[in-house]
Image (spheres, rainbow, N blue to C red):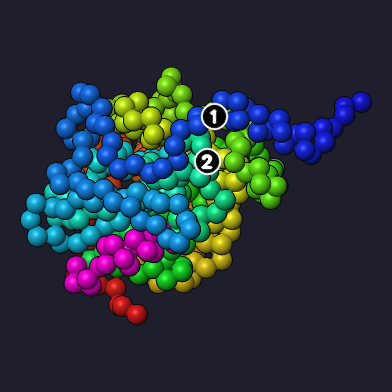
Amino acid sequence: MRRRLPVVAWACLLALPLVSCGDEGARAPFAESRTPPSLDVRFQPPPGWAWGYVKVGDDLVQRYGVSAPPGAPRGQILILPGYGESAEGWFETARELNDRGYVVWILERQGQGGSERATPWRDLGHAVSFAPDVTATKAMVKAVIRPSGRDPFVILGASDGGLVALRAMEEGLRADAAILSSPNFDLADPPRAKGELIRVARWARGLKLGFVRYPGQPGWKREGPDGFGARLTHDRARGSVQQAWDLANPDLRMGAPSLAWYAAFYDAVDATGRDLKRVDIPVAMLDAGQDVKALPDPQSTVCAALPHCVKTRWPQARHALHLETDSVRDPWLKAIDDTLRLRMIHPSPKP
């Protein structure tokens, strides 16, 4: 007869791999990163790129970056990357949006990129709630970006960053439009069946053990797959960019998330789904037909529930649309440009 381990014993076994192998490095945020050797210029920081920090109350410090166009700006865009992405992985996109006349801001997520960490293990994406991400996003817009109202301001949320963007707008963040790029409202690759994962994740968080990973999920590995190998893009060069930055900057490295992160993700999905009618601005949802990270049905459900949402899907595209081949990425960039241009002509009413 199989005997069950007591709850405390099982919790200790969960924590053991993390405790024994964890990196005891500093949790502090950092700004300047080292450019990988031989990295193509298009993937390097845009001209005039500058770093900064935003902190709200007792929440963790989050890193952001900004770059401006060479001439007078025609609008501003705030990018919220998805899990495991740093601002460096978006430099090519920032450059091209600068060239189109837009000021580009990138706010990294709590405990990721150059942001402050909640645990001593820098490659562990840990969060007990997405609320600090939402609060930091609102503070970033209100206190740092401070849209003038004369030029359009658009927020772009990628992957689970789209979830944060939507929740911020439900809580009163104003923008002229929102762009959701491969937004993730339900995980296509959970380490366990969804119901069981939620139950275990919330149980671990309640016991203050949410800082551990689900058994068998790895931390960052040098030999791990890059974006191309993980089937996030069809473009080998763009798919290798984040890995190149990670290799040159150990503080940027991210492995699998903590159990508490999963609990926080599904909490945010539930909360966002209840308040979609509050988002009264135009939303452009840009989806990938070969997405291994985000399930398509929840994307369609969310877009249908939003008061003003138009969905575009590229059947042959993979999850990381900003890293895809030009055949997908060019129309993706055009969709972003068109959204901003349309708001120049028909700005959203201000409250």
Q: Is residue 189 left or right of residue 244?
A: right
The residue identified by callout 1 is 22
**Disc 2: CA contacts within 10 A as few (<14), some (14-19) or many (>=20):** some
Residue in view at x 56 percent, y 25 percent: 21
SS at badge 1: loop
Predominant SS along the magenta part = helix
Q: Looking at the image, can residue 217 be seen?
A: yes
Q: Tags 1 and 2 in contact by the CB under 8 Å rule?
A: yes
In the rendered image, the quadrant that contains the N terminus is top right
Amino acid of disc 2: Thr
Give, as a single range, the part of the protein colored magenta: 135-151
The location of residue 105, given as percent across then percent down, is: 27, 53
The location of residue 192, given as percent across then percent down, is: 64, 37
Magenta stretch encompasses residue 197: no
Can you tell which quarter of the image residue 235 is in? Answer: top left
Above or below: residue 29 compared with residue 177:
above
165 vs 18, nearest the viewer: 18
Residue in view at x 59 percent, y 41 percent: 211
Check the image and name the residue furthest to the left: 71
The location of residue 149, given as percent across then percent down, is: 23, 72
Above or below: residue 293 compared with residue 284:
above
**Disc 1: CA contacts within 10 A as few (<14), some (14-19) or many (>=20):** some
Task: Give the spatial CA distance, label 1 vs label 2.
Answer: 10 Å
331 vs 96, nearest the viewer: 96
The residue identified by callout 2 is 119
